[in-house]
Amino acid sequence: NAGVTQTPKFQVLKTGQSMTLQCAQDMNHNSMYWYRQDPGMGLRLIYYSASEGTTDKGEVPNGYNVSRLNKREFSLRLESAAPSQTSVYFCASGDVALAKNIQYFGAGTRLSVL
Amino acid sequence: AQRVTQPEKLLSVFKGAPVELKCNYSYSGSPELFWYVQYSRQRLQLLLRHISRESIKGFTADLNKGETSFHLKKPFAQEEDSAMYYCALTSSGNTGKLIFGQGTTLQVKP
């Protein structure tokens, strides 16, 4: 039981490049989330998917897009990376009914944009 | 607006000393509050939630609705408690979204 798996673990991009962060969960959770973690800012929600086929903006969605490919997978795309997107990105999953609002996190992706 | 505030970026104590990590919130309605912990080189994980009213690794947290606080306490800190601690609350609606505080780094010195 792997829980929440994120790839890649590390990535360096040049300004303007694009990339997709992958996330998969094997806990049969309905909801999935993408956060960014910045010093002094805590975790801020970028996008979330309450169920398969739906996505919604969180607190800081600008510059990102997401795809809920199926119940297991939720990807985050940076179309044109900017230095302000240098951060650690966490994917999480949860189920309001099953997991009672508890979220389970991936190991994170450390992204640097030069 | 729904908000979680952790006023201390860093809390440094000696082993065996009591610990209190502060968390204040603003929320209209009945919030559900959590403490998450991130140990070095590990993923963020749930430490405890106020509904459970349990003690995990010697930590407890009591919801004080009058003071809108959910402080995390431990009577005797251990070196292995050193970590980043986040207070969080579930936002309104049934989406399971969490609003996190800024985080407090707890450093327990030998």
Image: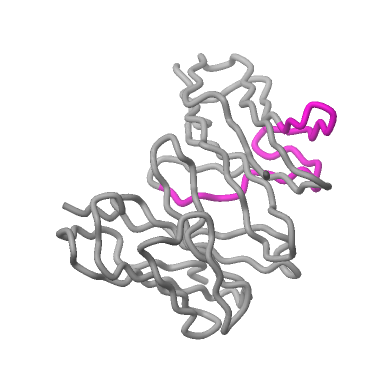
For image coordinates 55% across by 50% down, the residue present is B45
Answer with the quarter of the image where residue B78 lies: top right
Q: Nearer the viewer, residue A47 or B44?
A: A47
Main secondary structure type of the part rendered in magenta:
loop
Image coloring type:
one colour
Classify A112 as above or below A94: above
Q: Residue A30: horizontal and vertical position, in percent?
A: 63, 75
For image coordinates 65% across by 31% down, the residue present is B23
Q: Residue B56: horizontal and vertical position, in percent?
A: 68, 40
Q: Residue A26: horizontal and vertical position, in percent?
A: 53, 76
Asked if residue B25 is among those painted magenta in the image, a careful observer would answer no
Instruction: Report the magenta residues as a range.
Output: B42-70
Q: Residue A110: horizontal and vertical position, in percent?
A: 30, 54
For image coordinates 16% across by 52% down, the residue present is A114
How many numbered circles are shown? 0
Judge from the rendering whether residue B89 lies leftward or rightward of residue A75; answer left or right. right
